[in-house]
Amino acid sequence: MNDLKQALLELPTIKRIKELENFIDSNPKLNHLLNQLKTKQKQMVQAKEFHQQKQYSIYEAEYKALYNEILNYPFVEEYLDLLEEANTLLLDVSNIIEKRINSHLKD
């Protein structure tokens, strides 16, 4: 597992994500906006769970406004794209591992 972890950390995508995270961490305003975005996501989930459609719509509009403001930072769109790429990669690796474990358990 350590070899897999090390291999993933050495991927150009992961290295670039780390670089961009350093930029984000060093920018207090952007960090604040990202935290607000996460809060809006949580509020949207809660409103949806409790069938509060009107409140959900309000949170969704606020989320979209924050998201668009965050995209004004030149490297954020690249960061979000890379995160999506990394998440897809991790899901693929997870599925491969799961299939191999299940095949060994069947034998």
Image: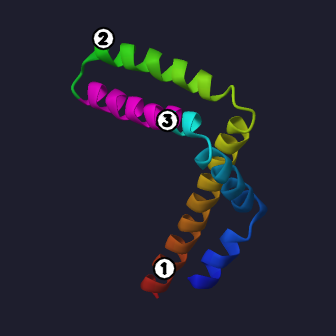
- Residue 50, position in %: x, y? 21, 26
| Closer-to-camera residue (101/46) | 46
Tell me the residue that label 3 is attached to: 32
Magenta stretch prevailing secondary structure: helix
| Contact (Cβ within 8 Å) of mark 2 with mark 3 | no
Amino acid type at mark 3: His
**In the image, what residue occupies the spot 74% across and 56% down?**
16
Q: Nearer the viewer, mark 2 or mark 3?
A: 3
Gap in Å between the C-alphas at discs 1 and 2? 46 Å
Q: Is residue 68 above or below residue 86?
A: above
Q: Name the residue furthest right.
A: 12
Tell me the residue that label 2 is attached to: 54
Q: Which contiguous range is marked in magenta?
A: 33-49
Q: How many marks?
A: 3
Q: Helix, strand or loop at disc 3? A: helix
Gap in Å between the C-alphas at discs 2 and 3? 26 Å
State which tag comes first along the sequence, 1 or 2: 2
Q: Helix, strand or loop at disc 1? A: helix
- Residue 36, position in %: x, y? 44, 31
Q: Name the residue furthest bottom.
A: 107
Q: Nearer the viewer, mark 1 or mark 2?
A: 2
User: Is residue 43 inside the magenta stretch?
Assistant: yes
Tell me the residue that label 1 is attached to: 101
Q: Name the residue furthest top.
A: 54
**In the image, what residue occupies the spot 25% across and 30% down?**
49
Residue density around tag 3, few if under 14, some if 14–19, many if 20 or more, within 10 Å: few
